[in-house]
Amino acid sequence: MSERNDQVQDAVARYLEYSELGGRPPDFSDLPAEVQDEVNEIIGMLEQTEGVALRTAYPDDSGLAGPGPGRTAGHLLQNSTSEPDRALLAQLDAWLPPGTPVDVDGAPSGFSLPDLPVAGSWTVGTTGGRVRVWRIDVPAAADVEKNTSHLVSLDRVFRAFSETAAICLVCADLNCLLLEPQDCAPVIEVPAGGVTARKYRRPIQPVGEALAAFLRELIPAWEALPRFETGNAQALDVSALAAEAASGAVGVQKALGARARYPKKDVLGALGEPEAAALEQMAIALYEGTSSAEEVAAQLRKLAGAP
């Protein structure tokens, strides 16, 4: 593999680590210009596909062909000129954890969404928990909650973008309805077995509060792994461990022989050091790889006097 391919793979790996785990955006300025171009092209395709099959870019994505690391609600807020968009992005900036990826979403332009006039759209999070936030031209979320007919259209969105964990419909009052896939598709009710109609399962909430709570629920915080101390590691005495295990196995069989009937009683009672030594050597050979499991099984059958 050429040095250029190595550089491209390393750069893409650093970008994927950043996009999934967060932290400081990777800096590709030290790479040659032709390597940067190739890396930007690959990252652009990753941003466009978002974990689903390749498709043509949406009209609203024309300015997002390059890599997207570093975009957050605060970054988009600085470049937004629409007052409703600024109000919504300010809510996201205030409520979401620092560094949460936020980007423009062009998905609504590819779907027919009756009764859902989408005026602005963004994606929040990574493929581990991507939420599509759509600002719709409806005065209040209570008006949307009265109508469930458009859930059929949203079901098509979930099926087309399998990485979508939820769709957040935000109204002019900055209250929202957060929908998951099971809200937009008929569900078989347990234990009755009947089909439950599409419906809203989550209450109306302010968008920042609802989205922050959902992301915490979807991607819980994990405690840091403790440091593994390797300095005090001790080498295993394989011979001693094999001898102990072999003696223990023979001892168990002799104890069973004391309660067994003849002729099994005589056979088990006769076990002793020679058998334990043979088992010990089998265990060591198996550990060192000089004998296979099949060979050890054959030796055990021979030791037991089986044909």
Image (cartoon, rainbow, N blue to C red):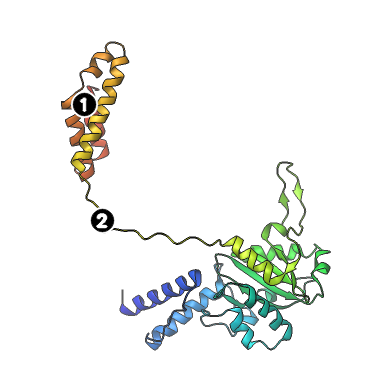
Say whether residue 289 is visible. no
In this view, 209 is above or below 181: below
Q: Position of residue 266 (x, y in %)?
A: 23, 14
| Sequence order check, earlier mark of 2 and 1 | 2
93 vs 10, left or right, is right
- Does residue 86 appear left or right of residue 44 in this picture? right
At a point 48% along the width and 69% down the height, the residue shown is 21
Amino acid carrying mark 1 in the image: Lys
Residue, disc 1: 302
Spot the residue most to the top.
262
Residue where numbered disc 2 is placed: 232
Which picture quadrant has residue 246? top left
Q: Residue at x 28, y 16 (%)?
A: 258
Q: Quadrant of residue 155?
A: bottom right
Residue 31 is situated, as x and y percent measured from the top left of the image, at: 37, 85
Q: Secondary structure at mark 1?
A: helix
Q: Is residue 280 above or below residue 257?
A: below
